[in-house]
Each structure stands twice: as structure tokens, then as C-alpha cells.
Amino acid sequence: MSSRRLPTRPPAHCAAPGWWVPALAVAGAIWVLSSLADTPGPPLHHPLDWGAHFLSYLALGYALGRATGLPVLAWMLAAWWGAADEIHQAFVPGREAGITDWWFDLAGSGLGAWLAGQACLKRAARRRVPHGDEGAGPRS
């Protein structure tokens, strides 16, 4: 049994600035689709549209989590974007704003941000363990 403890939150150097490109692309796609009176494809009714909210914000939360390296910040940014998007939809003809939609945005972005944090922890743990030393216990 190793005396080394794994961190419970991502290290500060976990941010990957290249992930801002997909984060901004997902945020932009969400905004553009929300600006349309009719979204492309067949109409989605409850509960299918909640699944679409969950999955799109899961992608946004993950990308923001990788970009910032801070899952809580990523979740807060995605939550703000979801709230702004719901307010925006209230002014788009043919669309409506809904608190339930935002709850699914929060759930999806929270899971995405958490998954990004877990990916960072795994990468950090792989960097700390030298090859061939995985099974070695504490050294005396």
C-alpha cells in the first residue's frame, strides 16, 4: 500500500487553452440554435428536448472544464450561459424560456465539468508515477 495520496481536485496547471476553441464553438452553436424559431430536424418535445439540453451543456461543461482547468468555474460559466440563453429564448418568436430546461443545462454542465476534472486528475496521476514504479510501495 502506497503512502502517496492522490489529489482530490485538479492541479493548477491543468488548464488546456486549446480547449477554448471547442468551448466557444459549442457556446456559439447553442446561441445560434436558440435564436431560430424552428430548430433543424424534427421537433423535440419533452423529454427529448431535455436530453438535448443535457447533452449540449455536458459538452460545454467538459470543454470549459478542460479550458480553465477549474471544474467549479467551468460549471459556473456554463450555468451563466444557460441562464442567459433561456432569457434570450424568451424574446425569440416561437420559442419559450423554461426553468426546467435550465435545470437540465445545469445537470449536463455539472457532469461535463466534473468529467473534465477527473480527466485532469488521471493525467496528473500518470505524470507523477514513473514507468516501472507503479507497484512499488513506500520507500524506506
Image: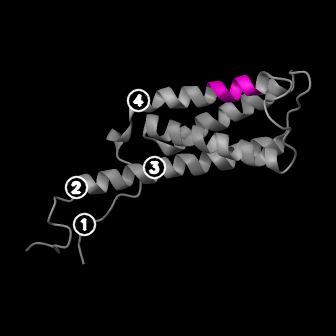
Q: Amino acid at mark 2?
A: Arg
Mark 1–mark 3 contact, CB under 8 Å?
no
Mark 1–mark 2 contact, CB under 8 Å?
yes
Crowding near pointer 2: few (<14 within 10 Å), some, many (20+)?
few
Crowding near pointer 4: few (<14 within 10 Å), some, many (20+)?
few
- Of the residues under marks 4 and 3, which one precedes in the sequence? 4
Which residue is the site of mark 3? 117
Q: Amino acid at mark 3?
A: Gly
Above or below — where is 19 with respect to 65? above
Which residue is the site of mark 2? 128
Q: Give x and y (percent) for residue 117.
A: 45, 49
Q: Amino acid at mark 4?
A: Gly
Q: CA distance from mark 1 to mark 4?
A: 31 Å
Q: Main secondary structure of the magenta part?
A: helix
Q: Secondary structure at mark 4?
A: helix
Q: Secondary structure at mark 3?
A: helix
Tell me if residue 29 is in the magenta stretch: yes
- Of the residues under marks 1 and 4, which one precedes in the sequence? 1
Camera-side mark, 2 or 4:
4
Q: CA distance from mark 1 to mark 3?
A: 20 Å
Tell me which corner region of the image, top left, top right, bottom left or bottom right, holds residue 109. Answer: top right
| Residue ID at (88%, 29%) | 95
Residue at the farthest bottom position: 1
Camera-side mark, 4 or 3:
4
Q: CA distance from mark 4 to mark 3?
A: 16 Å
Q: Is residue 126 left or right of residue 105?
A: left
Q: Secondary structure at mark 1?
A: loop
Q: CA distance from mark 1 to mark 2?
A: 10 Å
Crowding near pointer 1: few (<14 within 10 Å), some, many (20+)?
few
